[in-house]
Amino acid sequence: MANAMTSTRLLITRSFEQAQPFVELLSHTSLAPVEVDCVPIRQAVAHTPDSELMSRLPHGGFSWALISSANAVLSLKKYAVESQRTLPQLLATTKVAAVGASTAQVLADNGVVVDYIPSVMDAQHLGQELPYDDDQPVLCVLGKTSRPTLNHVLASRNIPTETVILYDMEPYPATNPLTPLRAPEKSFALGQVRERWQEYAGVIATAPSLLEELVTYIYGEESPVSFPPLIAMGRTTASHAQRLGLDVYIAPAPTPGGLCEAVHHYFL
């Protein structure tokens, strides 16, 4: 049974640009107006990659490229452009796996055919289920703050793995972000969030690190006992929320539709 909602203001740990598909879908499916504050907390910036690893990517050096996020896609695209290629050309000799549907969509939007998405859209299941039948290494395309889950699971399967770090996360607003904000007035800084914290009827957390930073900023060293009802975008974020002592619901899918379904079920 859906929980009663005392306010219509929600917070999501994404920029307005990233959250726009969810915000628009929610506005079209909600009977009552719902305000969504978009709070990026951090923005992705390009990280100089290992040139030797990247030089092997377009020449059949890897059996699979495992893409961990939309930011990884944008970082690969930036590298491709700088090396005078398109993203499909960069990945032409490699099978491509995406951690989830949202990442797969960004790849498709950039002309890349995705060969595999795990049944449960997270790094653990990507590593467990990857249909590897080769003797070439796989390449994990990660961010500097990415958790080691994918690498650990692949190692447990004795799959030869190499990792390239293509982006880092800097506090919002970052200098030269991968995705500049087209409407910065629609994204909120943490200071603004603190001023209206008591107004939030729910929080949607999209990554463990962003959730932890939000909790630390609002509560400091105190226990987050009055934290609003929380929806996690995936199992990894949900597990981290539980370690922080938070009650959490898990969206049925890490997609705009999955988030909307969770909001309607738990908050509206």
Image: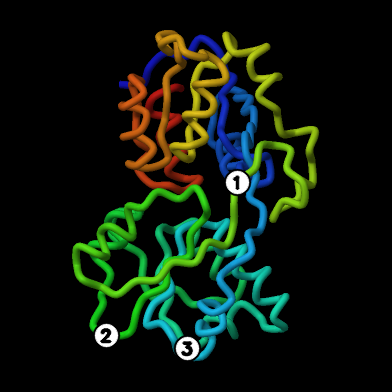
Q: Which of marks 3 and 2 is nearer the N terminus?
A: 3
Residue visible at 49% across and 66% down? Answer: 164
Check the image and report above or below for 267 versus 15.
above
Q: What element carries label 2?
A: loop
Mark 3 and 1 residues: CB-CB less than 8 Å, in contact? no
Which residue, given by chain and number where applicable, does mark 2 sit on?
A: 134
**Amino acid type of the residue tagged 2 in the rendering:** Asp
Q: How crowded is mark 1: few (under 14 residues within 10 Å), some or many (20 or more)?
A: many
Residue 88 occupies which quadrant of the picture?
bottom right
Q: Is residue 39 left or right of residue 147?
A: right
Which residue, given by chain and number where applicable, does mark 1 sit on?
A: 169
Q: Position of residue 220 (x, y in %)?
A: 52, 14
Q: Position of residue 38 (x, y in %)?
A: 64, 33
Q: Is mark 1 on a helix, strand or loop?
A: strand
Which residue, given by chain and number where applicable, does mark 3 sit on?
A: 93
Query: What whole-number distance in Å separates the C-alpha atoms at marks 3 and 2?
Result: 14 Å
Q: How crowded is mark 3: few (under 14 residues within 10 Å), some or many (20 or more)?
A: some
Total residue callouts: 3
**Amino acid type of the residue tagged 3 in the rendering:** Thr
Residue visible at 32% across and 41% down? Answer: 235
Check the image and report above or below for 90 versus 118.
below
| Res 128 visible | yes
**Amino acid type of the residue tagged 1 in the rendering:** Met
Q: Earlier in the sequence, mark 2 or mark 1?
A: 2
Residue visible at 57% across and 8% down? Answer: 198
Looking at the image, which is closer to me, 244 or 13?
Answer: 244
